[in-house]
Amino acid sequence: MNELRKTCWLVVLTMLIWGCSDWLHLEPESELIREEFWQTGEDVQAVVAGTYKELAGTIELLFKWGELRGDLMVPGVNISTEDRKIMDGFIYPENELNRWNQLYRTINFANTVLKFSPQVVDRDQSFNENESRAFEAEALFVRSLCYFYLVRIFRDVPLVLEASENDAQDYYPAVTPAETIFLQIIDDLTGSVQYLPTSYGRLEYDKGRATKGAAYALMADIYLYFEKYQASIDACNKVINSGLYGMIDGEDWFMNFFPGNSNESIFEIQFDKDLDQTNLLYRMMAPNPGDDTFPDGNDEFRVSPYFVKEFEKYPSDRRAGNRTYWDYSGAGWYRFETSHVLWKYVGTEGLPSLATGASASGYRTGNRESDANWIVYRYPDVLLMKAEAMVQQGALSEAVDLVNLVRARALVEPISNIPNKNDLEELILEERAKEFCGEGKRWFDLVRFGKRNGYERVGLMVEILAANKTYEEAEIIRSKYSNPNSWFLPIHQDEMDQNNKLVQNPYYENQ
């Protein structure tokens, strides 16, 4: 996104306008400042770039929302107290993980593009309506992605479709039912996809900006979550039949993560250390030897040893050791134990000798941050989403074929003779765990599994979460997650105190 980055300096002005830490309580700045800014197509482009930049600021949160309550990660030595509580099921409205302001900041950037870009068409003769609609379509994609995260995490949330611009706006909005938000984001994506390109003619743009493929992948995911299975299949087919994506060779599987932007990538949030665009994924995952030697991470989260055992059942699996995870034994806290490092955001390839931030001598270079991209959708995700939807449509053999495409790339034996729908559902859930471990998807996969068809498999979902826990931990998990209301986080207490129109998730009303 080099050309967009060149214009990102213009976003400094917009950051002055939206500098409040929580947009839902933002007091508007002078409208004159707004009008002075929105004069050229370059101004619109700059704020679109700022929208992606705001989205990039959410990825540590997206990782935690998608993984901490699942079963694939376990606490590291330096996990924060609040993150540990989330992982253990002790969730209260005061926990910092319950804050949604970063998503709403991103939404507000998107809303400003939608509001002001059409006005710039009248002010800049070199900026035409088609260009404006293309930028608006990107904004709608990002806004829809943000709302999809919000409804899966909080269920009913405020649906804000207007940018902050004058004193008459309602700055304390009420919540909107999740089903209404579903209709809104599907309508937005359906209307905007026609204005998105299939390609921008440049790799970083094709993978890091909204395209038709990215929009259809998001639509497939949304339809799958809301149990609109044929619509999900249709959206998956738009991606598959485009011919633009495919799975890379299994030996190169780690190239999905380093350097990223592989042929199977559909949409990933871009980072570039040379441009001071970094994230905290390396810091959260890398070990901390405690003796000032590399890798020098924080050791906040590790891959579950029980999940590693599942991988070890198939020694040929190309996604296993030194790829998804790295078995690390080192100094300090690790002297008497082996930990399983989530290697996707630490390594430069599937070998433990190469890691981001390593110097030639193997010692740390002070790099406690990384520029690993955050993958939102890649091609195997679409194949497995389609398989999941086809199981619900009764097309078991077609679903098996799709799963086997993913397994064949991993050098895992194909499946056959699946006797019933339930067994195939569980197998797809396991395959997604192995393919996407640590990519922020596990919790959402389990929720889809548990709520489907009137919560008919909630019992198995709870047992998956309770497995490999101590007796006391398992009892807490069973007690909590047997109630589907507990699957959604509480609205942060600060939000509840400031906005009396909000309605707390009923599971947390008396906490």
Image: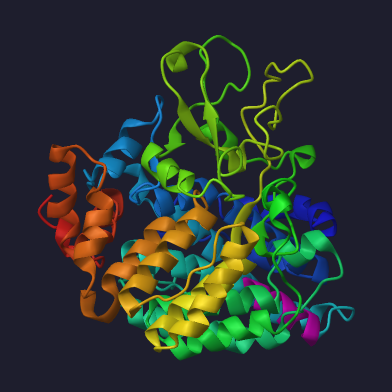
Quadrant of the rendered image containing residue 507: bottom left
Residue occupying the point 69% across, 55% down? 250
Q: Going by the picture, which residue comes out furthest to the left?
A: 510
Residue 42 versus residue 50 in the image, above or below: below
Q: Residue furthest top?
A: 291
- Magenta stretch containing residue 331, yes or no? no
Count the numbered circles shown: 0
Q: Residue at x 45, y 13 (%)?
A: 335
Q: Is residue 257 left or right of residue 228?
A: right
Point out residue 287 in the picture as x, y percentages from the top left corner: 52, 25
Residue at image position (50%, 50%) is 314
Q: Is residue 452 left or right of residue 478?
A: right
Q: Please say if 420 is above or below 447.
A: below
The residue range painted magenta reads 129-139
Asked whether 170 or 412 is in front, the reply is 412
The residue that appears at 50% across and 76% down in the rendered structure is 400
Confirm whether residue 158 shows in the render: no
As rendered, which of 38 and 31 lies closer to the eye? 38
Q: Quadrant of residue 42?
A: bottom right
Percent position of residue 193, x then y: 65, 84
Question: Within the magenta stretch, is there residue 130?
Answer: yes
Instruction: Give the colouring mode of the picture.
Output: rainbow
Q: What percent of the width, then of the height, locates residue 21?
A: 47, 48
Q: Quadrant of residue 422?
A: bottom left
Residue 224 % position (x, y): 43, 78
Q: Residue furthest front?
A: 417
Residue 468 visible somewhere in the drawing: yes
Give the overall secondary structure of the magenta segment: helix
50 left or right of 59 in image: right
Q: Assign the N terminus to one quadrant of the image.
A: bottom right
